[in-house]
Image (tube, grey):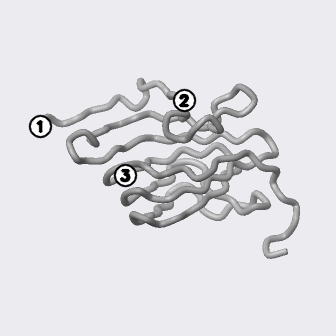
Amino acid sequence: MASTHVDIEGAAWNPGVPFYGPAAVYEGKDIVQLKILSDRRAEGGGIAWLAKFTPPPGKLIKIVATALSDEHVFNLEGGRVTKAGQPVRRSGGYTLNPEGQPHSAFIGNETVSLVIYRGEPDEIVSLEVVDASSAPEGS
């Protein structure tokens, strides 16, 4: 099998709807976009992509998912936030969601991540745009 090379700068951002569902579009704008880097699922491998999440001003993207295979997430820009929109994980962070693991995230600013799945990508249980809570965490 030959090596795969992708010109990241030249690759277009594509709508995230095929993987994240129709909620990846909010008020006519793509809030989840992907650059597919490789897809070897047909050969028994996995899929890798760059994911860009762009929440509307004053809003959060809330994602609830279940890992259908090991999911490796490297935050390149932005990161996760609390329900109140306060940063929790910034760029440079790494997360492993093992196969079968339910997990969730709040994204409050433009975030770009490298996501690598060992097999099939996550089952997206829900994706919604919510208001950032002004309430302190734990209340």
Q: Amino acid at mark 2?
A: Pro
Badge 1 is on which residue? Answer: 1
Vertically, is 19 above or below 27? below
Horizontal side of residue 68 vs 5, given as left or right: right
Between disc 3 and disc 1, whose residue precedes? 1
Quadrant of the drawing holding the N terminus: top left
- Amino acid carrying mark 3 in the image: Tyr
Residue at left 54%, top 44%? 112
Q: Could you tell me residue 103's position as x and y percent?
A: 55, 63
- The residue identified by callout 3 is 117
Q: Position of residue 17 (x, y in %)?
A: 55, 34
Local SS, label 2: strand
Q: Report the front residue among 35 and 125.
A: 125
| SS under mark 1 | loop
In three-dimensional space, the C-alpha distance between marks 2 and 1, rounded to whole angstroms, equals 29 Å
Q: Which residue is mark 2?
A: 15
User: Where does the image place residue 127, in percent across and percent down from the top left?
Assistant: 64, 47
In percent of the image, x 35 and y 29: which residue is there? 7
Q: Is residue 68 left or right of residue 119?
A: right
Q: Is residue 38 above or below residue 11?
A: below
